[in-house]
């Protein structure tokens, strides 16, 4: 098929969960179809990734660079005018014009949109089937922000959440197929867009890249990883530092906390003032830091979908202690594949028990790896994707013989598009 894929950020390097999914999907589509990949670049440090995308995914790229500060201002203005911050931030006249030109000039069989923010680039009334990969339902994250933050910021987050939800509902009405990462996300989308045709494509992991640690660390190092300017991650590490780490150190005084991830916010950098707390910033490869850790943590209080930090740690055979929200997208069994705790005292108890019991760390790590192998290999997820996309493949050329009278085309008629609010 000839496919146009629109991703919300350049999907390389794949150092966040959404970029990792977009990269693996794009690479897979590029290997089996003729692919045009379009995206926004809002971080100049990501520009070298263009060469990798051309070499490993497709040479056919369309992108637009945006200045992050101006995009934020543009998003704020959109929100003030009754729109959404998300669509304002990711809106680019240049990219919209390039995509419109490509659609007018070339015949595509399918459009694959990664993240609802990019559905704005699909022109209204287009008769090309569109697959909308929501990944997670973004509006719910904003609504969680609104419940978590104090006014007036909480009001702003809440307004963004409800407006984005209305937009997601309208997109789900005209998209031929809506993809999400978990059954929980599918149920959430169906609760406000019951007309959506949905399918679950779980997030995966490269099992060859993330191999179990050969010599697990015996040092009492607790590790958290993620983009450290992302509100849920900032909240999680501050919560662990303030409420959980003191309880752990009361039992294991030499415990160290390693916070690994790009763009640490001022609040995160301040945590490094505490003895035994390390804030690395961006690292070229996160795997050596996993190898230095005894326990990986995911104490997220704001979360949706599958957390890549959790399945990465499990793939490397490391024990994980996570909040219920952090693992709600997994079918893993608490106590068998990872430990789950939601209040500070219980979370600290799980961490302490693992730090003090090397055999339990190894047992939990082995079972976690087996779970990821069985449920989150990219090969399995992408095979599911292939089966869903096959229905959109163009019919083969008809033979010279006339078709039987009255036989209807198997290709579904295009749905009318509903304008976004």
Image (cartoon, rainbow, N blue to C red):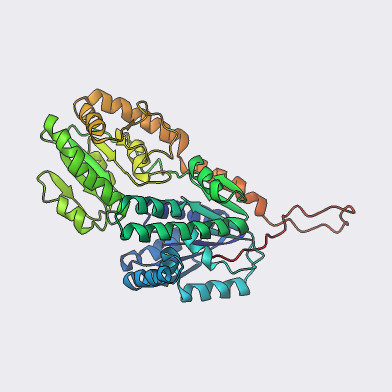
Residue 115 visible (yes or no): no
Image side of residue 45 versus residue 182, left or right: left
- In this view of the protein, which residue sits in the foreground, 227 or 236? 236
Residue 246 visible (yes or no): yes
Which residue appears farthest toward the right when viewing the image? 405
Q: At 61% across and 68% down in the image, what residue appears?
A: 124
Q: Percent from the top left, x then y, of residue 187?
A: 53, 43
Above-or-below relation of 241 to 48: above
Quarter holding the C terminus?
A: bottom right
Image side of residue 63 versus residue 236, left or right: right
Q: Percent from the top left, x then y, of residue 119?
A: 53, 63
Q: Percent from the top left, x then y, of residue 301?
A: 32, 44
Above-or-below relation of 92 to 371: below
* Image quarter of residue 46: bottom left
* Image quarter of residue 369: top left
Q: At 48% across and 55% down in the image, what residue appears?
A: 27
- In this view of the protein, which residue sits in the foreground, 152 or 120? 152
Image side of residue 49 versus residue 163, left or right: left
Q: At 68% across and 59% down in the image, what residue appears?
A: 415
- In this view of the protein, which residue sits in the foreground, 131 or 88? 88
- In this view of the protein, which residue sits in the foreground, 153 or 17? 153
Q: Percent from the top left, x then y, of residue 76?
A: 37, 69
Q: At 50% across and 53% down in the image, what residue appears?
A: 134
């Amino acid at each position: 098929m000839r496919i146009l894929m629109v991703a919300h950020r350049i999907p390389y390097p794949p150092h966040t969960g959404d970029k990792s999914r977009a990269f693996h999907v794009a690479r897979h589509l590029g290997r089996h179809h003729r692919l045009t990949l379009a995206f926004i670049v809002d971080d100049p440090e990501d520009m070298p990734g263009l060469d990798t995308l051309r070499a490993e995914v497709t040479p056919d790229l369309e992108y637009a660079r945006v200045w992050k500060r101006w995009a934020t201002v543009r998003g704020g203005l959109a929100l003030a005018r009754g729109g959404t911050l998300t669509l304002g931030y990711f809106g680019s006249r240049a990219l919209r014009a390039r995509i419109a030109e490509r659609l007018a000039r070339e015949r595509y069989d399918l459009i694959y949109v990664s993240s609802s923010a990019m559905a704005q680039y699909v022109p209204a009334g287009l008769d090309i089937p569109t697959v909308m990969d929501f990944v997670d339902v973004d509006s719910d994250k904003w609504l969680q922000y609104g419940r978590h933050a104090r006014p007036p910021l909480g009001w702003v987050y809440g307004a963004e959440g409800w407006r984005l939800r209305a937009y997601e509902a309208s997109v789900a009405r005209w998209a031929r197929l809506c993809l999400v990462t978990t059954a929980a996300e599918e149920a959430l989308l169906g609760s406000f867009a019951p007309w959506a045709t949905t399918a679950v494509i779980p997030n995966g992991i490269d099992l060859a890249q993330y191999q179990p640690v050969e010599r697990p660390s015996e040092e009492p190092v607790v590790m958290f990883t993620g983009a450290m300017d992302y509100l849920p991650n900032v909240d999680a590490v501050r919560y662990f530092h303030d409420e959980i780490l003191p309880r752990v150190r009361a039992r294991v005084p030499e415990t160290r906390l390693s916070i690994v991830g790009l763009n640490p916010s001022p609040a995160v950098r301040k945590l490094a003032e505490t003895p035994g707390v390390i804030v690395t910033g961006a690292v070229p490869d996160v795997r050596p830091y996993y190898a230095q850790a005894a326990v990986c943590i995911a104490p997220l209080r704001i979360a949706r979908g599958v957390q890549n930090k959790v399945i990465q740690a499990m793939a490397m055979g490391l024990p994980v202690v996570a909040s219920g929200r952090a693992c709600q997208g997994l079918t893993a069994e608490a106590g068998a594949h990872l430990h789950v705790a939601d209040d500070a005292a219980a979370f600290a108890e799980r961490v302490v028990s693992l730090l003090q019991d090397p055999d339990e760390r190894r047992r939990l790590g082995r079972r976690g790896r087996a779970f990821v192998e069985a449920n989150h290999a990219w090969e399995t997820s992408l095979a599911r994707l292939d089966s869903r996309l096959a229905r959109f493949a163009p019919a083969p050329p008809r033979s010279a013989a006339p078709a039987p009278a009255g036989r209807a085309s198997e290709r579904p008629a295009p749905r009318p598009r509903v304008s976004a609010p």
